Image (cartoon, rainbow, N blue to C red):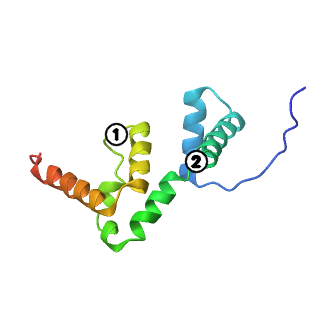
C-alpha cells in the first residue's frame, strides 16, 4: 500500500517554476517526484552534519580578520563537493593564522594569472 499523500499549495516565482519544469522534464519525473527528491536531498544534507557551511560561514564573518578573506575561503568554484566539504571542516578546525596564510596565497595566485 502506497503512503497517503496530501495536496499542498505553494507560491513560486516564475524562475522557480521554470527550474521545476526543466528539471522534471530532464529527469523524467513529475513535479511531485521532483520536489520529493529535492526536499529529501536538502533534508539529508542539513540533518546529517550539513550545517557545515553555516558554521564555517559563521566563524569567518564573526571574526573581522577572517571576514576579510571570506571570498577566498568560501569559494567552491574550482573544487568538487567532497573537496569543499573538506575545506569547510578545515575552516572550522584550523587556526586563524593558517586560514589567513592560505587565503593570502590564494589571492596571490589569482593576481599572478594572466588576463584574458
Identify which residue, 33 or 41, lies in the foreground: 41
Q: Secondary structure at mark 2?
A: loop
How busy is the neighbourhood of tag 1: few (under 14 within 10 Å), some, or many (20 plus)? few
Say whether residue 17 is left or right of residue 101.
right
Identify the mark at residue 50; answer none if there is no mark.
none
> Vertical placement of 61 versus 39: above or below?
below
Residue ID at (71%, 54%): 10
Structural distance between the alpha carbons of marks 2 and 1: 20 Å
Give the quarter of the figure containing the C terminus. Answer: top left
Give the quarter of the figure containing the N terminus. Answer: top right
Q: Earlier in the sequence, mark 2 or mark 1?
A: 2
Residue ID at (66%, 40%): 40
Residue ID at (51%, 52%): 52
Say whether residue 88 is left or right of residue 110.
right
Q: Which residue is mark 2?
A: 49
Identify which residue, 46 or 92, lies in the foreground: 92
Residue 59 quadrant = bottom left
Query: Residue 77's x, y, as percent?
Result: 33, 45
> Vertical placement of 39 versus 25: above or below?
below
Q: Secondary structure at mark 1?
A: loop
Q: Which residue is mark 1?
A: 79
How busy is the neighbourhood of tag 2: few (under 14 within 10 Å), some, or many (20 plus)? few
Residue ID at (32%, 63%): 96
Amino acid at each position: 500500500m502506497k503512503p497517503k499523500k496530501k495536496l499542498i499549495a505553494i507560491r513560486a516565482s516564475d524562475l522557480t517554476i521554470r527550474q521545476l519544469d526543466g528539471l522534471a522534464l530532464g529527469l523524467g519525473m513529475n513535479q511531485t517526484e521532483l520536489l520529493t527528491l529535492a526536499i529529501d536531498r536538502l533534508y539529508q544534507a542539513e540533518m546529517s552534519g550539513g550545517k557545515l557551511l553555516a558554521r564555517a560561514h559563521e566563524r569567518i564573518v564573526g571574526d573581522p580578520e577572517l571576514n576579510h578573506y571570506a571570498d577566498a575561503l568560501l569559494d567552491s568554484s574550482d573544487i568538487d563537493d567532497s573537496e569543499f566539504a573538506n575545506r569547510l571542516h578545515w575552516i572550522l578546525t584550523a587556526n586563524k593564522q593558517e586560514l589567513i596564510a592560505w587565503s593570502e596565497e590564494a589571492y596571490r595566485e589569482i593576481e599572478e594569472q594572466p588576463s584574458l
